[in-house]
Image (cartoon, rainbow, N blue to C red):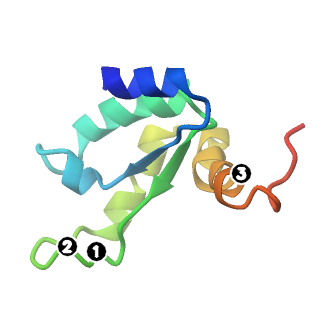
Amino acid sequence: MIALRALLESRPDIHVKATCPDWLDPAGAPWDDFVRSVAPLVADYPDRVLWGTDGPHPNMQDAIPDDGALVDMIPRIAPTQAAQRKLLVDNPMRLYWPEDAPVAS
């Protein structure tokens, strides 16, 4: 995490995709380690974190995660409505479709 933060500090054009708690948290559901790692990034870099999934989970044959449980992670890592909007709408629009993104006021 220290290296990731150093990278984020070194370049303003680096973004992070918060994704796959089911892969990244060896303790398993409810993926508290994922939350402890990712929530501070969302708080500290609110304009540079995006939410993502790998649904429909093409690489998983046996233990396909419950998509509802994955989506339930969003308010745990972005607890406010404003943070959720950035994570889900504003940041992806600005990164992938800047010509269509609303201008920040």
Check disc 1 and give the amino acid type: His
Regarding mark 1 in the picture, which secondary structure is present there?
Answer: loop
Mark 2–mark 1 Cα distance, whole angstroms, equals 7 Å
Mark 1–mark 3 Cα distance, whole angstroms, equals 26 Å
In this rendering, position of residue 35 left or right of residue 32: right
Regarding mark 2 in the picture, which secondary structure is present there?
Answer: loop
Q: Count neighbours of disc 1 (C-alpha within 10 A) and say few if under 14, some if 14 to 19, many if 20 or more.
A: few
Q: Count neighbours of disc 3 (C-alpha within 10 A) and say few if under 14, some if 14 to 19, many if 20 or more.
A: some
Regarding mark 3 in the picture, which secondary structure is present there?
Answer: helix
Of circles 2 and 1, which is in front?
1
Q: Nearer the viewer, residue 79 or 62?
A: 62
- Identified at 33% across, 37% down, the residue is 35
- Identified at 42% across, 59% down, the residue is 71
What is the number of the mark on residue 64?
A: 2
In this rendering, position of residue 12 left or right of residue 39: right
- Identified at 67% across, 40% down, the residue is 82
What is the number of the mark on residue 57?
A: 1
- Identified at 63% across, 37% down, the residue is 47
Of circles 1 and 3, which is in front?
3
Between disc 2 and disc 3, whose residue precedes?
A: 2
Seen in the picture, residue 5 relative to 83 is either above or below; the reply is above
Q: Position of residue 34 (x, y in %)?
A: 28, 40
Seen in the picture, residue 82 relative to 63 is either above or below; the reply is above
In this rendering, position of residue 14 left or right of residue 96: left
What is the number of the mark on residue 94?
A: 3
Q: Quadrant of the C terminus?
A: top right
Q: Nearer the viewer, residue 38 or 81?
A: 38
Q: Count neighbours of disc 2 (C-alpha within 10 A) and say few if under 14, some if 14 to 19, many if 20 or more.
A: few
Check disc 2 and give the amino acid type: Ile
